Amino acid sequence: MLKIALMMLTLTADGAVRLTLSEAEDLEDCQGAMLAVTSVLEAGGYTVLAAECGPTDLTLTPFNHGATAAEESHLYRVKIAGEGAYSVTPLAAGDACTPATEASPTVWCTRSSQAVVE
């Protein structure tokens, strides 16, 4: 079932790209959360690489604030085709992922502490 979610990509201290996906009540709620979270992260010195609100059928476990790099063991390919148009694809260990951050659509190879909920 499609739902609206905030998808954020941030740069970690070790240079990896972190994915967070958080469900929202509706697009307006999502956009408000996106502005607030982006502001807080940037004020804290974090680099926000992308933030989009849009539909997804993927459900992930809740975001764990303060997760270590070792806990960010779930890998995803994120494709962003435009405003609100993103897809998140889980990757198995060993699956290839080639980033294309200057292309259109952009492709990011990410890690997350959030696991897929089946």
Image: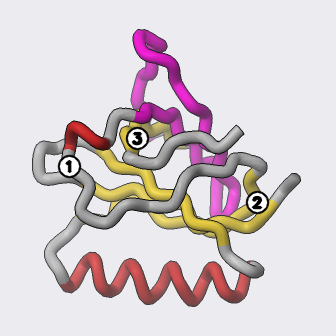
Question: What whole-number distance in Å separates the C-alpha atoms at marks 2 and 3?
Answer: 21 Å
Q: Residue at x 77, y 49 (%)?
A: 57
Lower sequence index among marks 3 and 1: 1
* Residue range (magenta): 74-102
Depth check, mark 3 against mark 1: the one in front is: 1
User: Would residue 16 be found to the left or right of residue 94 on screen?
Assistant: left
Question: What whole-number distance in Å separates the C-alpha atoms at marks 3 and 1?
Answer: 25 Å
Tell me the kind of residue under disc 3.
Answer: Thr
Q: Residue furthest right?
A: 1
Tell me the kind of residue under disc 1.
Answer: Thr
Question: What whole-number distance in Å separates the C-alpha atoms at marks 2 and 1?
Answer: 28 Å
Lower sequence index among marks 2 and 3: 2
Asked which quadrant contains residue 69, the reply is top left
Residue 99 on the magenta span: yes
Q: Nearer the viewer, residue 58 or 87?
A: 58
- Element marked by disc 2: strand
User: Would residue 20 be found to the left or right of residue 59 on screen?
Assistant: left
In the image, residue 64 sits, relative to residue 25, either above or below, namely above
Q: Mark 2 — residue?
A: 55
Residue 68's disc is 1
Q: Residue at x 74, y 53 (%)?
A: 56
On the image, the x and y values in percent for residue 65 come to 31, 66
Depth check, mark 2 against mark 3: the one in front is: 2
Split into 4 quadrants, where in the image is the C terminus?
top right
Q: Nearer the viewer, residue 105 or 70?
A: 70
- Element marked by disc 3: loop
Q: Mark 3 — residue?
A: 101
Asked which quadrant contains residue 101, the reply is top left
